[in-house]
Amino acid sequence: MAQGDFPLLVERSAPGRIGAAVPQSDVPEVPLEQILPPAQLRGGPPPLPEVSEPDLVRHYTQLSHRNYAVDIGFYPLGSCTMKYNPKINEDAARLPGFARLHPYAPDALAQGALRLLSELETMLAEISGMDGMTFQPAAGAHGELTALLMIRAYFADRGEARTRVIVPDSAHGTNPASASMCGYGVVQVRSDARGNIDADALRQVADERAAALMLTNPNTLGLFEERITEVEEIMHGCGAQIYLDGANFNAVLGITRPGDQGFDVMHMNLHKTFSTPHGGGGPGAGPVAVKSHLLPYLPVPVVVREGERFRLDYDRPQSIGKIRSFYGNFGVLVRAYTYIRTYGPLLRQIAEAAVLNANYLLALLRPAFDLPYDRHCMHEFVLAGTRQKREHGVTTRDMAKRLLDYGYHAPTIYFPLIVEEAMMIEPTETESRETIEAFARGLLAIAEECRTNPDVVRSAPHTTVVSRLDEVTAARRPDLHWPIADY
């Protein structure tokens, strides 16, 4: 058996072994043939593994240890803000009054939950500089779609047939996808030499056809938009709306507010900035905050406070309608509420520590890698492995795979697309100086290996349960089952 390997459940199985003792049923047994059509009945029981409870628990516990998680080690994914998740958030989300609340409970029986939503809206509106919000969107891309649907409804009410959405060339890939889903054409604008959206190029395409600019600030290069006030003047000058992709909100928390920068609408990734475990497809929450002129278009229902009582308001004639069942991923909202109430006025220190950590790590790594934009970064930064590829034939992907041998998850690579051999790193505020320095030593050692022993990097990883996988085949033709037998 390979190192770190363990038996499959079918290999642990023994005939007749069970993991639980079920008492004899006192309900008269009805033959299945009287309940289901014969064609839908099995010819016999499925050949499932027969194992004891300890074997079952150990099997899945061993499987879980193969997953990398922020509770295990440093998770430097750029633009994903994989910060540590305080366990007090989990305790709050598991309070019976929240965890056991039925989603169809009437307003009168859900006053605690509605109060939490109302207070969370007030807090996030203050933090973002906005006037109101919806918690329905399930994640960031869903928030983008929601925001653009509201913008479309806003212009429809004004009788304006705007047809285009402007995005920078460094934008998240979901930005143009969301615009297309709303029926808009997408116009791309290049970045300038300092990594900002090129304001002069923006001015050339900002006209009465533009419905919105979709901007991330700080942008996906980890840089604050130095000409943001000029950008705001250009877009509002042609009557368009400005949308903020809030994926990088962690960098400016408590320091500057998007609403004060001129943004009309934004989404926030509560599972990033406000610390909820995420990855593997969920959970997530991408609430959308708006300025007052977009409030009528918020999805229904909206939480309304009337004295000391709260209710869900569905009577919103200009609303874009419902964009998700119930009221969003409520457990994520409870965790975000707990996080904000825990830190309170210290929220600013979160952003300051994130920016400090990122700039410190950048200073440690910049001698060994190329830096496409030589500026102080915000909460994340982008390096380039072009030197290693040019001089030693080692790619950024090779170095990311080799990093696994040093015990670290790889950072985001090959994004943003405008940086060749990109390596996007975000340490977050929750990592210690010792962790950051150890991670830097690992990457610097790999850079040295590229020079002295490039083959060991090109053939990495060497210590993982499986070696380098064919990622294209895995994505296009995934094999997700173990064939026990046909039944």
Image (tube, helix red, strand yellow):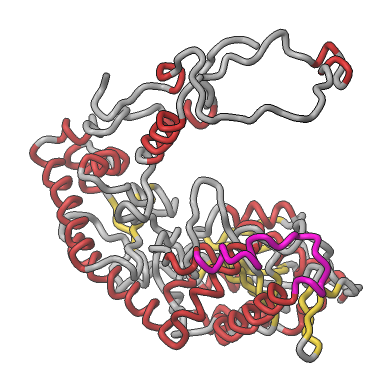
Q: Viewed as shown, does residue 118 lie left or right of 233?
A: right
Q: Which residues are magenta?
A: 91-110
Residue 32: x and y in percent read 82, 18
| Residue depicted at 37% across the width and 55% down the height | 70
Residue 332: x and y in percent read 58, 63
Image quarter in which the N terminus is found: top left
Q: Nearer the viewer, residue 312 or 369?
A: 312
Placement of 67 over or under 337, stated as above or below = above
> What residue occupies the far bottom of the structure in this picture?
307
Residue 105 lies in quadrant? bottom right
Q: Picture coordinates of residue 340 (x, y %)?
A: 50, 78
Q: Locate residue 290, reporting x and y percent.
A: 69, 77
- How many numbered callouts? 0
State whether residue 286 appears in this view. yes
Q: Is residue 196 left or right of residue 168?
A: left
Residue 92 inside the magenta-drawn segment: yes
